[in-house]
């Protein structure tokens, strides 16, 4: 039996280096591996918890889809779809919500941090919190559990969500017998704290990201903005504690990485290190960037790909959905 792998990206911002290194790159690796079934999707209804402008929603969703395709996702081997095209996910989401203790969701990081912000700002605890934000982990559990997913490649910030999916699956299984597979998260350990422009974790919410498909000139400018310390060019530097180096090694060959490591030890100016980072990243991204722009100029073709994917997805999950409904006693 092949293991099922699944991951999604919500369209709430442009795809950035953190998305690529934390989720897309490992997921593409798994899609190439014959021992896995892979399902990757645009989590547009998760995006709706934040994005309430239809034009923005459309642009960001196509952006996420085009990113996967431009980076080489093979849609013959991986199932690639839009979450909103698979209605069974939302049906399951309701069922699961009846097995999700409210207290569990109260403790979800994303919700808790909104509550804390409100408290610090002297507002009502739930001010600005819609129910989509609150039940976000349940919808994510439905995404995962409907596909009998074993492995979920995600960034570190999503660990809690996968754990919540496990908890919900366990409580359903306890009531109705073995039904859902308990999923595990897959984290890229070495790169799990990818730094953003300001040295904090790269994240849309900190507004410190480097968009992956940025045009060369802007890309160079953004790379030049990455924070570095005030050491002089000739001073030896520790590559392993350098943000520049940790980004460099994601795009460079292993030979290039070793040469750069030596340069750090013998002393390299930050300006030069940044120029080298730009150079490897820019040449790595050249083809994907062209493909990305080309894909975005024909969104109907993207729709077609996603719809084919949704059909495949539904073929896979509809029998299981029926089994779930039987278990809860909706029919015999
Ligand atoms: N919550 C994920 C994020 O913000 C996106 C997501 C939605 C997801 N459903 C998922 C990831 C299922 C993995 C599995 O990045």
Image (cartoon, rainbow, N blue to C red):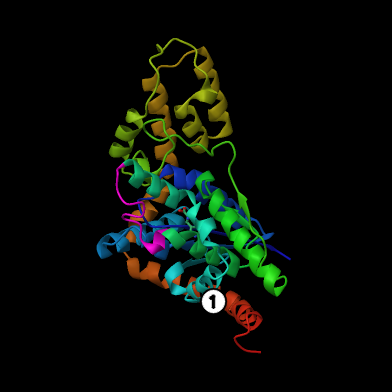
Residue with the mark numbered 1: 314
Residue displayed at 36% across by 21% down: 271
Q: Main secondary structure of the magenta part?
A: loop
In this rendering, position of residue 148 left or right of residue 67: right
- Name the one closer to the observer, 254 or 313: 313
Which segment is the magenta one?
A: 121-133
Q: Decide whether residue 152 is among the magenta residues.
A: no
Above or below 323: residue 8? above
Residue displayed at 37% across by 33% down: 197
| Mark 1 surroundings within 10 Å by alpha-carbon count, few (fewer than 14), some (14 through 19), many (20 or more) | some
The image quadrant where one finds the C terminus is: bottom right
Residue displayed at 41% across by 72% down: 304
| Position of residue 136 measured from the top left corner of the image (x, y, whole percent) | 46, 60
Residue farthest toward the bottom in the current orientation of the protein: 332
- Name the one closer to the observer, 242 or 51: 51
Q: Decide whether residue 122 is among the magenta residues.
A: yes
Residue 24 is at least partly visible in this image:
yes
| Position of residue 206 measured from the top left corner of the image (x, y, whole percent) | 36, 40
């Amino acid at each position: 039996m092949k293991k099922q792998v699944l991951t999604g990206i919500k369209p709430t911002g442009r795809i950035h280096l953190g998305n690529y290194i934390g989720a897309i790159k490992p997921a593409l690796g798994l899609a190439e591996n014959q021992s896995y079934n892979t399902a990757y999707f645009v989590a547009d209804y998760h995006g709706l918890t934040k994005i309430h402008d239809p034009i923005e929603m459309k642009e960001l969703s196509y952006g996420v889809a085009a990113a996967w395709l431009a980076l080489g996702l093979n849609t013959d081997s991986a199932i690639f779809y839009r979450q909103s095209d698979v209605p069974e996910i939302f049906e399951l989401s309701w069922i699961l919500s009846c097995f999700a203790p409210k207290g569990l969701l109260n403790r979800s990081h994303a919700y808790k941090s909104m509550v804390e912000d409100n408290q610090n700002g002297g507002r009502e605890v739930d001010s600005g919190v819609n129910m989509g934000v609150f039940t976000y982990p349940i919808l994510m559990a439905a995404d995962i559990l409907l596909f009998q997913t074993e492995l979920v490649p995600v960034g570190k910030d999503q660990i809690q969500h996968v754990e919540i999916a496990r908890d919900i699956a366990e409580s359903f299984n306890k009531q109705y017998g073995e039904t859902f597979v308990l999923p595990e998260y897959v984290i890229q350990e070495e790169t799990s704290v990818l730094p953003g422009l300001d040295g904090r974790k790269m994240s849309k919410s900190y507004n410190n990201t480097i968009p992956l498909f940025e045009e060369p000139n802007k890309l160079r400018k953004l790379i030049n903005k990455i924070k570095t310390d005030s050491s002089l060019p000739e001073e030896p530097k520790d590559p392993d504690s350098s943000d520049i180096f940790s980004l460099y090694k994601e795009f460079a060959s292993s030979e290039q990485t070793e040469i750069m490591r030596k340069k750090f030890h013998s002393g390299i100016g930050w300006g030069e290190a940044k120029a080298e980072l730009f150079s490897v990243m820019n040449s790595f991204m050249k083809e994907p960037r062209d493909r990305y722009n080309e894909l975005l100029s024909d969104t109907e073709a993207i729709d077609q790909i996603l719809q084919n994917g949704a059909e495949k997805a539904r073929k896979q999950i509809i029998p299981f959905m029926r089994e779930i409904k039987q278990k809860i006693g909706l029919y015999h």
